[in-house]
Amino acid sequence: MIMQHLPVLQVVVPLLTAPLCVIMRHGRLAWAFTTAISWACLVMAVMLLLQVLEVGVVSYHIGGWAPPWGIEYRVDLLSAFVLVIVSAVAAIVALYARLSVEREIAPERVYLFYTMYCLCLAGLLGIAITGDAFNLFVFLEISSLSSYVLISMGKDRRALTAAYRYLIMGTIGATFYIIGVGLLYMMTGTLNMMDLAERLPTVAGTRTVLAALAFLTVGIGLKLAMAPLHLWLPNAYAYAPSVVTALLAATATKVAIYALIRIYYTIFGKVEILEALMINNLLIMLAFLGIFGASAVAIFQNNVKRMLAYSSIAQIGYMVLGISLYSVTGLAGGIIHLFNHAMTKGALFLALGCMFYRFGSLTLNDLAGMGRRMPLTMAAFIIGGLSLIGLPLTAGFISKWLLVQAVIEDGNWHFAVMILVSSLLAVIYIWRVVEVAYFRPPMDNTGTIIEAPLSMLVPTWILALACVWFGIFATSTADIALRTAAVLLGATP
Amino acid sequence: MTTQALILLAMILPLAGAVLIVLSGRWPNVREAVTLATSATLFGTVLSIAPEVLSGGRPTVRILEMMEGLNFFFTVEPLGLLFALVASFLWVVTSIYAIGYMRAHHEENQTRFYAWFAISLACTMGIAFAGNMLTLFVFYEMLTLATFPLVTHHGTDEARKAGRVYLGILIGTSIGFLLFAMVWTWVMTGTLDFTDGGILAGKADGPMIAVLLGLYVFGIGKAALMPFHRWLPAAMVAPTPVSALLHAVAVVKAGVFTVLKVIIYIFGYENLAASMQGDWLAYVAGFTIVAASIIALKQDNLKRRLAYSTISQLSYVVLAAAILSPLSEVGAALHIAAHGFGKITLFFAAGAILVASHKTDVSQMVGIGRRMPWTMAAFAVGSLSMIGLPPTAGFISKWYILHGAYQADHMVAVAVVAASTLLNAAYFLPVVYRAFFLDGEAAVLQQAPAVGAHHHGEHGEAPLPCVIAMMITAGGTIAMFVFPGLPISLAEQLIGAVP
């Protein structure tokens, strides 16, 4: 019975947790409840993944209405993989959140924070699971609205303007998306993704469909912060509470990437829209613009959190690059980077949260001597940093390997050079932090600072070790990514 | 114990040693005992792997599969064994030396120093025993990171800057070129395993080979081929034991070792010779040999002079490999061992002089041979080996390299070796001459008012552990000339000689 309804429970459970948190009106209690629920979500996601690996695609009809009339939840390998990523990060971040949230958010608003946390989680999971283009919009809005609130809860007053800017740009993105969906509905009379894929080829050449594609691309591009549509991201990440930054950086943009893959490879899969319209060339250009531009800007940041925010834009570029290569290896590289980067950035932002908890500041100068004051936190930061660079034995290496392999297979040598050179930019901005943390003597007023509390350190290290684990034992993740990519490309010859 | 277990032990031992060193950090004597015991056991372990390899065995340990088809495993073959033997033996000697040096020189953070040193050795063993390019690459990068804290040990501004150059060049070349070359090879051949005869045979042809070879040899920044050599002089800010073992033996030899592995097992030296696409490498190596020697001539700081000499000597190995004749490959392998013993002696001597007299420049070392006869005698032996004169190990390897060059009719290589022998003599012999045959008293009297050397004016020999270490390595340099059997038989297996 439960197994049968697993797909809908995956979304409904966190969705219902949110109002319950409001009813509790107690910060600690809400935290415990949220943590329990997010771990339950992880269990459900893993069960779904196992089910998909065993029997193939799982289709669930909401309210028993058969698609294409009713809303369909459709869990294929890609969905299940993204569900696991999102719920795993959410579970670990929830474990970490208690002390960090108490420090950064006013006590009377803590329970509201967890309410929004659950809503955001429900929205993100919903995007990954739904097989309906309009339903995706609904979940997109749920996750976006709750993340505007989460960001605005940051202690720094600039969090408000950052959230406001994100609100404006996010709303434009969502509106563009819904315009695109509306145009598609106009031409095909359906909203179910599989159904759309069936019906699009007959109308693919029309200007309306092309306009729809443009709206969808720009709309989702705004949500995933694809350069040059990234302007909302640096401030939103920099001024949001530490927990929120970790959650959003590791999940929100990843889910948007997922939506982009769905649009190009499922909805427009049968018409091979990337190749037909040469959109991939445009996307590759934008990807490299993001990779190089954002990495270069990251090097000059003084706030470490902001620096990592720019690094996120660059890493999103790698994922977009993987998607637009239009080959099994390339798409697999993009998908696996989605996973690996979630672990990496999660670990890095959690480590920054630990430092902020003790130091109350994240400018480069204030982190002087951090290596001596908080050796374990800094070690986790370095592991995350190495993974960001893509050194062997870290998850980032596997992504780089697949991406470079993909471009070499296509004979695009110059892309291989650009991918590798760009990872060297990461060396520069990570090493700036390392030098400050280890070579500068600690400041006098930091004498009392000790290592972060265990309840924050353990989740940080779980993610840091995950970076190492999935860099060594990458057979399973690489296998899933390659199979997913093959299905996405192969099922739509 | 099975050979497989021994291979794993060779990597686990130094790591376990590092943990014990950290745990015993409060008691320096225990800590140093741990270092010595670990290094001695490691050497014993590597030595006990030797018989099987010498009799033609290739013991292999499979660890795991990283991605579909990309394995992580170890195979001990003759070249790797030779490298591991040299590195692990010299670690024992360096440990003895370091005890004398670090204490007499009042270095700080010694526990951290010994711990990272042990970890570096674990990485070196991983490089030596790697069964494919991926495994080698993993340990290659780990070695770069593990030696970074050693290079920047003093934590000064100068050390920080040197660390930047060190990391920038080594990581930059390895990710920018080497990783590229590996993925390219992987796409073309579907394997990265070291295979006799090379895996690229028949898979690549034409100028593509030249490009790929360039990506490999310049990607291996640790081989210090010009123009990617600057990290080596920069790394000289490290304490002398680091310069001695890591930047004369382990790290730099890991570089040329990898070049040799790539040429023999990835390209296959016979294929490379047949394709005519590898010729340019001999010229680049030859240029590096001569240019680095000329720069060494002008260095007054002894450690810097040694660093440039190392750059030049490393390119001997690359040159020998690039001659692509069987005997020159043997010479390349032998030179890894011979130069290791000779250069570590020279660095030990430089460090001993620093500890005893606080002198760093060649021009200050007038008459020092009378105060430190043992140190300077060892220095003289090391110098002879660098020049390639009997009765030292350098003669043996140079003999094979020259022989190989004649075999391949490679007159440019012969000329380069001849020229560099003269240059070597020109920058080493004056140091020895100055130390023994110029009158130090007079020079000291002249300089006395100018330099603040008054309380170091009177000094004797270096601390005893340092002297013992130098005697061992200098003795080893001579012993390798007298009994060259083991290294030669290992090296000859490389070119298919049946044991």
Image: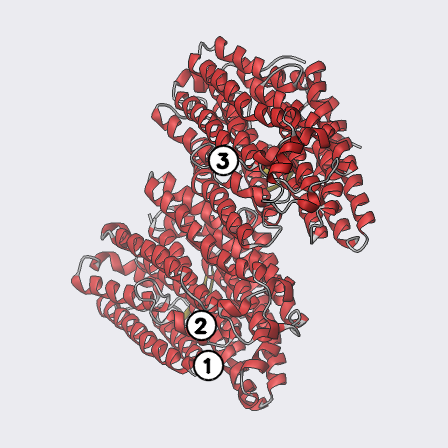
Percent position (x, y) of residue A274? 28, 53
* Mark 1 residue type: Asp
Query: Mark 2 or mark 1, which has the lower sequence index?
Result: 1
Looking at the rendered structure, the secondary structure element under dot 1 is loop
For disc 2, the marked residue is: A238
For disc 1, the marked residue is: A156
Q: Residues within 10 Å of mark 3 (few under 14, many from 20)?
A: many
Question: Looking at this rendering, what residue extends furthest in the left direction?
Answer: A207
Left or right for B25, reference A112: right
**What's the distance in space between the residues labelled 1 and 3, CA to CA?**
47 Å
Q: Nearer the viewer, residue A334 or B125?
A: B125
Return the chain for callout 1.
A
> Are marks 2 and 3 in one subunit?
no
Mark 2–mark 3 contact, CB under 8 Å? no
Left or right for A479, reference B496: left
The structure residue drawn at horizontal position 61% and vertical position 24%, both measured from the top left corner, is B433
Q: Residues within 10 Å of mark 2 (few under 14, many from 20)?
A: many
Looking at the rendered structure, the secondary structure element under dot 3 is loop
* Mark 3 residue type: Ile
**What's the distance in space between the residues labelled 2 and 1, CA to CA?**
10 Å
Q: Tell me the number on the disc at residue B220.
A: 3
Q: Residues within 10 Å of mark 1 (few under 14, many from 20)?
A: few
Tag in front: 2 or 3: 3
Return the chain for callout 2.
A
Q: Tell me the number on the disc at residue A464.
A: none
